[in-house]
Amino acid sequence: MGFRKVAELDALRDGGVTGVEVDGVPIALFRMGNEVHATHGICTHALAFLKDGYVEDGTIECPLHQGVFDIRTGRALCAPLTRDLATYAAKVEGGAVLVDLDSASDSPASEGEADADQVIEITDVEPLPLVIAGAGQAAAAAIRAARAAGFSAPIHLVGAEPHLPYERPPLSKEALGDAFDPASACRLPPADLAALGVTFHPGVRVTAVDAAGRIATLSDRTEIPYAALLIATGGTARRLGVPGHDLPGVHHLRTLEDAQSVAASLASARTVAVVGGGFIGLELASAARARGLKVVLLEREGELMSRLLPPALGAAFRRLAQANGVEVRRDVAVEAITARDGALGLTTTAGEIVADTVLVGVGLVPETELAALAGCEVAGGIVVDSAGRTSVEGIWAAGDCALHHAPLNGRRGRLESWQNAEEQGAAAGRSIAGDDTIRAEKAPWFWTDQFGLNIQMLGVPATSDEVALSGTDGAAGAVYRTLADGRVTAVIAFSDAAAIRAARAELASDTPFDLADHGARLLAPGEFEPTPIDPEEDDMSASPDVQFAKKYVWPQEGLSIIPDWVYTDETVYQREVERIFHGRTWNFVALECEIENPGDFIRSNVGPTPVVAARAEDGTIHVFENRCAHRAAEFCRDLSGNAKEFVCPYHQWSYDLKGNLVGVPFRRGVDGKGGMPKDFKPADHGLKQLNVTTHRGVVFASYADGMESFPDYLGPEVLREFEATFDGRKPKLLGHYRHSLPGNWKLYHENLKDPYHATLLHTFLVTFGLLVAGNKSLMLADPSGRHGVMASAKSDTTHIDADKKKEMRAYKEGMTLEEPRFMDFIDEFDSPWSVTMATIWPNLIVQREMNTLGIRHIVPTGPNEFIMKWTMFGFEGDDEEMTRHRLRQGNLMGPAGFLGLEDNEAIKFVQDGMLGVPGGEHLVKLDPGTEAGTADTLISEAAIRAMYRHWRDAMGIA
């Protein structure tokens, strides 16, 4: 394909990085004067975009975990990187930047990484090997560093686990999700193991060491004479140490298998108790909340991480967890765990808790027994110097089992971090190879991922330090500094990599930290204390409905105040799926014209649940879940089509157009063996079928039995407006749009029950008179409050009052249309309105904007995002000119329409505000004379209040 233009040189910041995308490939462009270099745009260690990184001296620093690449060669220059970055040929011609994707090349192996052609020298008398006890990250770092420093003797790697060395940080993060690949965490892949000349002994331990004779004995009775021994045994998860700590469903996390057990447990749980308020406990709580589970976190001390951090900083982590729905209980110790009716009961010093699973994160016990048996000095960890040497000649130690070589805040301690394992391991490896060069000391660095934030810490705080805050507490961009005698001891940044870069200079400075220069203020330990929670009033042993009702209480001000958790809380969202979309509602699924003939089908959704709407051979319409009754595969993969049956692609189970199971391959087995049980009845294993109704060519489905008729569901006033659009003419499909919006699904309902914004936000509406304050207008709400219609009659904008124009900032004097037919309104409906937007609870908007007609189908995917599926239609009797007219006016709507685009942006801004500054409330007090319901003015929020009156009833919120 060769070189192609990807950017203008002048658009690239000199000395900086710019991200572009070419054929779906993210590319990072680096400008150095008139020269440009191009690399792949994603870090090779974790999913981080280099366009957000920091360029300095010909290198790019990843914003996530501080890995550094050479921008010319792509070479990985430091940990945590083990793979180089792909580079591309780039040149500048005539002010344009050209890149050749076909020239992609991987740079030479990174420093310390094996060269595929490396030859380990073997002499006639083979030298004694290096034996490494423990096969974790520190061991991998030592091997790479030793080989890079010239160590040529054999290496024996002895690991108690069956796995090659891997990173442990993902175990409490990515590994608890659904898409984790263990290979992504491997620090010594098989190819490197071979190239580096390492003999791996999986599943065994070094059980004895003859330090004088330099012989290591393995648990399989193998004896290996050694020249050097590295103890990198790490540690084990500290057990809770109470009766019942080993019951099924109680999990401690240290190994890959532990993480897999935790993930499986979370997949089936509804309530989770996390014991321990340290980093691991918080990461486990974050993973559970990401699945929408109820989480209570128990901390024995008076504040989270009180043995590691100052109280004000521990409180910041606590508030972040609480803002994301975690119930945090402090000064609570677990005394026993018992099995109880398929769940677990926790007896605590503050009462009893019942949970489906218990996740324990109460620290690490270092494995130092081998070092002690070998005669090494041990004091809460193996004592080592800066090169990793122990007190016994020929023995080194590194990683979680070893102390840091220098005092931390006046005492020797261990650093249980990714960076420490990497650096201690590398120092030991170089020393074993004879390289005792002293390298510059790096400040300790640590990261944690919690509740959607990447939190990094540089330095070592003391619990007695003061805490200064810049930014918004507990939110992205918040930066905390710990201070001792006015000087910075550590910097903790919430999703702010730039602050960590700046922190290196701050930690090295002898100048006292200036609060005013950084817009910072000192925090008092109890500044943000919440109201204490009474465990008896919030007992997890209560029913889920009781728990929910006690936790989610509407503000006392009533309907005029809406709390943020209505829009951002995962538990609230899951309850909406259960009680609203799967509750007593009629949900739009299709237009009949989309499934007009027998065999026609279309994929649709009821809430987030995928369904299929199909017309059977007898002409009846059926809606059923798109989930095979056998192994849950989505059997229907086409968006629409015509079929005689549906066949699951996994095991070929087949279903008819009504959702009945009609075929099971090898149901009787083969040769009398295998197959389904004799009492298996296909009629009992069809697809989950929903109740279906149609009205004027529109198809609706419901999970609820005994639903009222659709006309009764709408009520007479909203039904009249619905039937003014669907007036008996047969709808004709014109096309579809589909896009995602980063906001809560209810905000779209609000947007169309909020005529106030329409007079202010939409330039097109106001300037061309489609919706103007003073128009004949109506904001109709049905008696239940769930449905509504925003209606307006087009006006002549040449006579808008000057005072109204001042209020309507979106109004643009003198704006005209190049295509005057765009605003033609053909009066074809039995309605006084030229514009109506009908919101049919919970997932449908019927759009009639003059003569353009559309269905907007809301598909929520979580509390913070939804998909909007647009179906544009006309009528079968339309002539060609009317069809063109409808399509022409269709440019008003859709994801990039003259009006739709502004609404989409506004919804995103609202959700961004809640996520960025959480814990707030919405003010909906316009038109106080109408408490909730229909309003005859555009300057009203009464219909929004009516909707939330109904929403609270449906959700069981007082």
Image: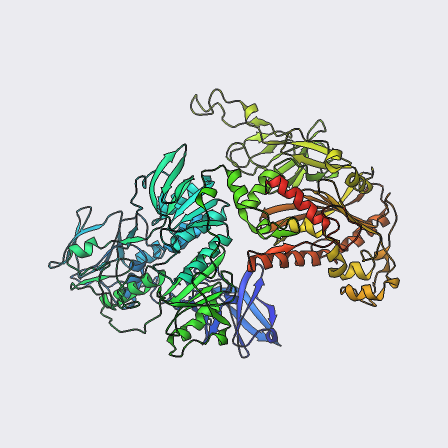
Tell me residue 558's x, y (percent).
Answer: 64, 48
Which of 11 and 96 lies nearest the eye of the viewer?
A: 11
Which of 129 and 572 lies nearest the eye of the viewer?
A: 572
Tell me residue 10's x, y (percent).
Answer: 61, 76
Q: Is residue 226 left or right of residue 689?
A: left
The answer to whether residue 73 shows anywhere in this view is: no
Tell me residue 285's x, y (percent).
Answer: 44, 50
User: Going 51% across and 32% down the picture, which residue do you hit?
Assistant: 630
Which of 398 and 639 lies nearest the eye of the viewer?
A: 398
The answer to whether residue 723 shows anywhere in this view is: yes
Image quarter of the N terminus: bottom right
Tell me residue 175's x, y (percent).
Answer: 42, 50
Image quarter of the C terminus: top right
User: Going 49% across and 75% down the picture, which residue do you hit?
Assistant: 516
User: Going 21% across and 65% down the picture, which residue do you hit?
Assistant: 389
Q: Using the image, determine if residue 104 lies above or below residue 630.
A: below
Q: Using the image, determine if residue 477 lies above or below residue 134.
A: below
User: Count of labels shown?
Assistant: 0
